[in-house]
Structures are given as structure tokens and as C-alpha cells.
Image (cartoon, rainbow, N blue to C red):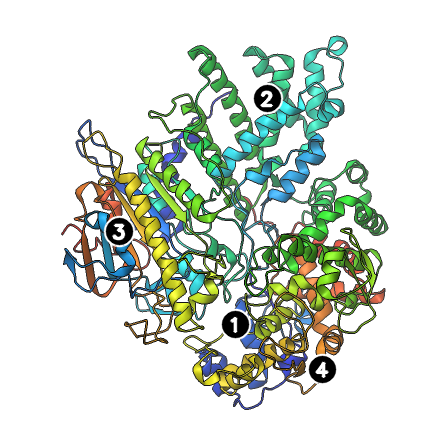
Amino acid sequence: MKKKSWHLSRRLFLGGAGATIALPLFESMIPTRRRVARAATDTGVRLAFIYVPNGMIRTNLMPTAVGAGYTLPSGLASLADLQDDFCVLSGIANKVGGGSYTYPDGTTSSDGPGDHARDTGTFLTAARLKKTSGDDIRNGISVDQVAANALREFTPELPSIELATKEGSYGGDSGYAPIYKSNISWASATMPMPKATNPQSVFDRLFAGIDPTATAMELERRRRLDQSVLDYCIEDMHDLERRLGTRDREKLDEYLTSIEQLEVRLAASGGGASCDPGTRPGDPSDFRQKTDIFYDLITMAFQCDRTRVASMILQKDNSVYDFVNVDGSNISSAHHQISHLDGGAADARKIMAINEWQMQSFGSLLRKMQAVTEADGATLLDNSLILFGGGMDATGDRDGDLISEASGPVHRHTNMPLFLGGRGGGAVTSGRHIEWTGAEPVADLYISMLAAAGVDVDTFGVEGTGPISQLAG
Amino acid sequence: MTAQFVLHGSYMETRPRVVPPLALPSALGLSRLALLPWLAWPLCLAAACNGAIGDAAPAGSGGPTPIPGSPDYCQQIVAEPGHVTLRRLNRTEYNNTVQDLLGTTSAPADVFPEDDESGDGFDNNGAILSLGDLLMENYDAAARSLSAEALGAASAARGRYLDCDAGALGETACARDFVERFGLRAYRRPLDATEADRLVALYENARAEGESHDEAIALTMRGILMSPKFIFRVEVGAESPDVNRLGDYELASRLSYFLWQSMPDEELLTQAGAGLLQDEEELRVQVDRMLADEKSDAFFLNFAGQWLQLRRFAYATPNAELFPEFDAALRQAMTQETLLFVRHVVESNAPVSTLLRADFTYLNERLADHYGIAGVTGPEFRYVALDTADRGGILTQGSILTTTSHPDTTSPVRRGEWVLDNLLCSPPPDPPADVDTFIQSEENAGLSLRAKLERHREDPACAACHDLMDPIGFGMENFDPIGRFRTEDRDGNPIDSSGVLPDETSFVGVAELSGILHQDERYTTCVTEKVLTFALGRSLGNEDRCFVEEIVGQAQVRDTSLREIVTQVVLNEVFRSAGGREESP
């Protein structure tokens, strides 16, 4: 079987320019990785994005004071030991999440209802979703995939991982196709990254070992055989390419890209994990236990440098998960249903209890990463940035007793509930409540997070024009 | 070919009370619609949810542009069958296919990542189904384990594809024999000479690398199972004279993935090879045969299961304190009832209206007890004749009633929306942005749900759409959030299940409501639309409305059974066409 050389370089092209292909408007976004002299102990910055659905009520989560040394609000009480290791972010907006918006070029969108679809779909893309309930979907590339494309040289086998705790679609949203509401990580305008939901499969994918009994020569022979299969598939693909039209070839392109990634993976197999990942986890049905196992896996993946980018959907928007006993009482209500606070104070209390659990879970992830000491003497948490939160401020105005910030409807895409864990290798001065005024675009935050990981982009999404202020302190 | 279309009908054409015609569009933030004649606005508003108006650019030179949705649209255009984007097998199809192909009982796709569903609610849409690194790794792992299993001494696959006597014929000849027999089924068409040679070369390379004959066959099988020609359903059209027509084998695959969600069987491949599937009578015979085969369970599970949102029912969460009796067994029983019921309607050639009005259902003891129906004992499901007008038809089935309820209360709004969307394909417009949907305020305390909703509809902006939804939902109010019949709500308010539709038609209870709905011209059209969407694996565009009309018309010539609709979908040009293929560069 002859080896085709052209398709090897193709990955580089796609990897670097995927954003351009997907979004011709944003050509300046082609990421470049800074080439700087790196010490042997330089471990690189790892990025994780954890998405919370259905919005959060900020009332008990927001410190009253800005800056360092703030008094912990009740909703963050569980993070007392971590106060120096994360930032509370206030005043960040994702305007494309809202229904009406004037773009920088002066054009106006009025996309109407569909806050849940936009909440999820735009969370990491900061791009405008094409409003369609058909199959002509369009989003933008997400920040984690920009990072994965640029950092893949460090972890070529696994540029990124995408996790979700549950399967199941809750349907579309007000004229938006369900796919928007199910995916935060987008490889291109039309292709969300498939998500792993089984912790055991994720463990195997990260840490599948080598056959210890095989000789190097035998391993090499197996690689050649594997390669012959892939070469055959690529030839078959070229047969089709010649006979199919444009739209079909987009699908073939997805096929080729993933075959090439498999090629990289198979070629590298046998490298083995450089650290001990521990025992293979279970697959508990309980959502909260599963969340914790996924946090272990993200931590180990970063620790062992199996990947440098992770995204995770805690739950999908419109999730009707019933957080029974999350606050010691029986909530026994569907999460989405109560998030609209139609039940007034009672619903607000339940949502706040759910939010408190979510913040505990954030703390649990940070502690796992804090417990890992890296080659440079810093903790894994120091060398990472963990963005945790959602796209909607669910602070309502219907219950004066509980909600002090009485303004606007429950699903706003301004003042996003966001928490940034870690120091990003020194790019972020943690331990502060940072406040921006004037609806600072979340896309600028993403530009800064990418920069912390050594990935330079000039623009991102619809609104991102440069790094966000204040992160360095 | 992207936008959905919305058919007009009696409700939508009726001017709502209260709202002045031009004020309403702007109240809904849809000012451009104010430019359209006011009589057209209800249609346009509905279309606004789907982006239909103005999306289409139908061919035509000069003269007024045909307007999608207008009554004579299909007389003004020559509808072109659309192209189905290269469609990978979804999880269900992958499992069924490898089971039929290899005789395995394993279901490798169970661990594949979830398939996204399209806005139409189906998970077999070619444009929506994408590939990715993780899925490709899964394909690789599945191909390795399936091929290893197939080469096992007593496997079904060995008997089917590997009975060649290598001692007598030679190993390479047997490899070629395997490649041609297995390839025909895996690629769902005969291999051409180049393809067969390429696979034999793959086999020979493995032999040269020191693999045994069996190991090299297994590796060749891996190649086939990883090939895009297996993973995707390739439709390039007939070679000649008409590339828009599907090839014989491509049509066999459309049939089998429509009615079985699996690969064609030997008979379909044989008929395709003989060119017989282009014959309409033969297609009828095949549809009947395929529906009679137990493999058509997949059709009911996946088509009906997704159309009627039984999959979403799996995530419905009735409040555990209020409804402690709602457990996994009851949920399973409700799902089973709906599936068996739909299957019966198809198998018995009953009119499609039977879905809405029936004097029978399928129950086991658990579900019968739940419904308060006596005389059903044991866990097995059986046909049960109903002697009451209170039950019968899908609107009285626990699955749908629970899915469309809130965890603690019924939702006439959601139930009405469900009917409009899924049975009439006339989804109501979205609520305007910034509208207050809050009905549980203190001033409403103590009012019945109906009274709260009626109060809500005093606001003209709300009334415009809720006049469409709420009355339908009121008709179903005799069923509580988990589908039990009731005559008063939890607070002791008597249930009032009367409703008045926007065209002033009034009714009391679900039996009368179903009677009105099944006579609505949109109903049969809507069912047809759903079947066609599932059959094609793409969203329907404006021009597809014309094919739907054609199918409905043909079905009505006979008996308008759901079975006839399925058959007419298969016989229609839109199903048998590869669609307008763009030129390759």
C-alpha cells in the first residue's frame, strides 16, 4: 500500500485554518502559537470550560466588594479554602446570546425567543446562531477548539476532550434546532464535537496502555498493518469524492479529518501514559457522582499531559434533572421548570440551592487540581485556567425578599455567572472579585485565556477584539 | 432546501378576536410582516418560527414569484426532489446493520457518542449527523472487535462468508470470494473490479506482513467496516440515463433504512440486482413484506418513538412526592402502549384518523390499573377493547399526557402546542420577547389553572397564540399529569374540559376534540410530512410541500391508512430520486 503524502500536511492546514474555513468573516482569528523559549520544567497552560445550564441566580454568589480579600457571600461559603485560587467575574456579557443585538458593523439582529438554545450554542463560540429548526445550522468555532488546534502539537493523540454527564435531547427551542442546545464545543460552524458520557470510555481513551509483552518490532509491524487499513479507507474516500457534490464532500471532509487523527493516534499508540492514572473508574448512574469522576479524569488528563484542553457540559439547557435533596430538602422539581421562577420565592430558593451545589462542585475540581504538584513546583491549578459557569443571569425580579438585584427578566445574557479558577501559569492574579462595567464581551475573556495558553488570536466571535482588562491584576 | 413549510388551515386562517390585524405583528416584534396582507398574517407568523417566508428562491422567469404556502404554489412551480446530504449510519442503524451483516448480537454503537437530532425531531438527518475524532475511534474499536468475533470458529459470519475451501481453491481465491460476498452486503451493492482488487491487495499485504489467512481476512473486514462506503449511505444516482433517479441498490437501501433502520436483506439485494425495484407493484410487495417482518419494530420504535416524542418521555420527571406511583415500570408500560397501538393501526390498515380516535388500546395489568380499567391481569400487553369515550387514541395515552405536563401540574398550553406542532404541523409562533409568561402571581392565587390561563389571555399579545393552544389543551384536562382520568383537580376545582377553537367550533372533552382534529385537513398532511421527513433523512423544504400534497392525494385514492401513506411515500418520485446533485469540480 503506498502512502499518500499530501494528506499528512492537510491536517496542519485544517488545524491551523479551520476557523477560517468555517468563518470566512474572521480570518484574522487564525491562531498562532507563540514560540517562546521554554524551560524544561515548563508544563504549559491547560484550559477547561465547565458549562452550567439554565442560568444561575447571582444574588448569593456575588461578593459585595471588588478586588482581593472580599467577604465570601453565602453561596461561595464552600470555597473558603480556595478563595485565593479563583476569581469571581462580574459584568461580562455574551450579547449574541440575547435576542436583539446591534453588531459592531451596525447590522442588527432580532432573533426573538430562544434563550436556552443561544445560552448553550453561543457559550464558547460567541457567534450568532443561524435561527433554524431545519438542518441548515450555523454557529462558529468554539474557544476550546481554537485552543485544541493550536496546542495539538503537544498532545497530538488527543488535542481536546469533550464530556457530558448525560445523554438525551430536550428538543429544540423556539425555532432553534436541538443541536444548538446540546453542544458547547464546535469544531466548525456546522460540526459540534461529539461528547463522551461514559467515564470508563474516557479513561480508556486517555490511558489505554500498550501490550507489555510485544516487542518494539512487533509493535511496529502492527502499526504498519493499522496504517494499511487507513490507507485503504482513504482510497475509498477518494472514489466517493470524485462522484459526490459539495455538501456531501463536507461530510467526507469530516471523515478524512477524523481518519487522519486516528492515524496520529495509532502511530503514537504504545507511547503509554507517563504517569499512573490509577484504577479504571465506574460508571455511576448518579449525576453528581459521575460529575466528580469526570473531574478526576480531567485532572489526570492534564496531570499526565494527555490533553491540554477540556470542555464539559454539566447538563444541557432545558435540563429537567431533579436535584432531589440537593439542599437537604426535597427539591423534586425539574431544573428548567423552576429556573423561570414562576413559583416565586420557593423556586428561587431551589435554584439557589442548586447553584450552591454547582459551586461546591467547582471547588471539588479546583481542589483536585491543587493537589497535583508539577515539574515547575507549581500546582496543576496554578498552571491551568478553569472557566466555570453559564451564559445566563437567572437573577429574577419577581421576589424582592430573596433577590436584591431586581432588574430584568430571568434569562439575561448580560452579567453572566462566571468563575475563573487557577492562575494560567501566572497570567491571572487570582483571589479577586473582578468587575467590568459596560458589558465586557466574553469573547475578550476567551482571547485572554487563549493568550495565557500561548495561543494568540486578534479577534474572536462577533465581539472579541482583544484581551480583556484586569486579569493580570 | 432548508426551511420547513407550514400549511395553512382552518385555525390559522381564522382571524383572532380582539387583536387589530396590523397591531399584532408589531406586538410580536415582527414588523416586516405588517407589509403583508393582513389575511395572510397568521400563516406568516407561523412561518416565522420556521423561517419559511422569503427563504425559497424558486426557479422561474418573470411574472410574480410563487409564494411558498400560497394555495396554488404547487401549480406554479415544478418541484425538484432535494438531495439528501451524505448520511452516516446513526447508532441505531449501525447496530442493526452489523447485526444483520454479521449475525452478531453485540451492539457496539451503544457506546458511540449520542447522535444529534434535527429540528424535525429525528436523529437520522444527514446534514446534522457529523463525524468526529471520538466517533472514528469508536468505529475503529468496533471494527476490531467485530472482525475478531466474525473470525471465531463458530460465528455466524464465518458460515456466511468464509465457507470457501482454501485448501482446494487457494487462499487468495478464497480471499477474493470473501471480499465479493462480504463487500456486496457491507457496501450494500456489488463491488467494482477496482474495489475488489484493492481489498485483495489489502489482504495480500497483511499476509506479506506475516498475518495468517484468517488474520488477514479479519484485517480486510476491518477495512470494509471503516470505509466511508460502509459508514455512510452513499447515493450518487443511477449511472444513466437519469442521474436524478436513485440506483437500484441505492433504492434498496432507502427502503431498508426507512422501514428497518438496517441494511437490505438478501431479497432486496436480489430484486435490486434484477432491476425489479423500479416497478411500482414490486415496491408495494416489498413494503408489505418489510412491514410484516419483525425488523419493522425498528420503524415503530424510531419513527413513532421520535414523532410522538416517546424518547423525550424517557426524561419526563413527574414530581415524586405528588406522584409516587410513577416508576420505571409504569413509564415502560406507557411507552409500550403507544408503540403497540401505532403498530396495530398500521398493521390493520386502519385509517390514519384511528390514531386520534380508537376504541381499543394495548394494556398490561399495571397500566390498566393506572387507567382504572378492570379485567386486565398479568404483565403481558394485550389488545383491550375500550367501552368508554373517555379513552382511546394517542391524546389519551399516558406517554403523551405525561410528556406534555409539568412535573406537578398539567399544562394545557404545552398539550395544545404539542398537538399543533406534532399532529397539525402548525406550531404556534414563539412568545414575543420580554413577555411575562408568569401566571402564578399572588393575584392569581386560588384560581384554577384554567382561570389563570384565561386571565392571561386577556392580554391581546398573549391571546393571539394562546387562543390557538389553550383550548386544545383544555380538552385534555380530564387527564392528570401522569395520564389518569379525573373530574376535579388537586385543589378540588371541577374539571372543565370544554374549549372553543378560534373558528368558534366548540367541544367538550377529548373525544369531541379528537373528532374535530382528525377532520382537520392538516392532520393527514402532517402525518405524511413526518413520515416523509423520516424516510428521507433531511428537513423538508418549500418545494417538498408539493410532493406531500401528491402523496396525500394518492393515498386518499385508496384508504388513507397510515400504511398507505408509508407506501405512497415509497412510490413517490421524491423518495426514489437522488436529488439535484451539484457538479463535482
Residue under pointer 3: A79
Q: Chain of mark 1?
A: B
Disc assigned to residue B48: 1
Q: Chain of mark 4?
A: B
Residue B219 has which mark? 2
Q: Same chain for marks 3 and 2?
A: no
Of discs 1 and 4, which sits in the foreground?
A: 4
Amino acid tagged 2? Leu
- Residue farthest along the top direction in this orientation: B167
Q: In the image, which is nearer the foreground, mark 2 or mark 4?
A: 4
Q: Element type at marker 3?
A: helix
Q: Position of residue B391 (x, y in %)?
A: 75, 70
10 Å neighbourhood of mark 4: few (<14), some, or many (≥20)? some
Q: Are marks 1 and 2 on the same chain?
A: yes
Above or below, A383 against A444 in this view is above
In the displayed structure, does residue A19 sit left or right of residue A229? left
Residue B533 on image: x %, y %? 65, 57
Locate residue B473 relative to residue B284 in the image: left or right.
left
* Along the viewing direction, whichever of B183 and A74 lies nearer the viewer: A74
Q: Quadrant of residue A36?
A: top left
Whether residue B307 is visible here, answered yes or no, is yes
* SS of the residue under disc 4: strand
Is the same chain shared between marks 3 and 1? no
Q: Amino acid at mark 4?
A: Val
Amino acid carrying mark 3 in the image: Leu
Q: Is residue A98 above or below residue B470?
A: above
Say what secondary structure mark 1 lies in: helix
Q: Nearer the viewer, residue A156 or B78?
A: A156
Residue receiving disc 4: B508
Left or right: residue B326 versus residue A149 is: right
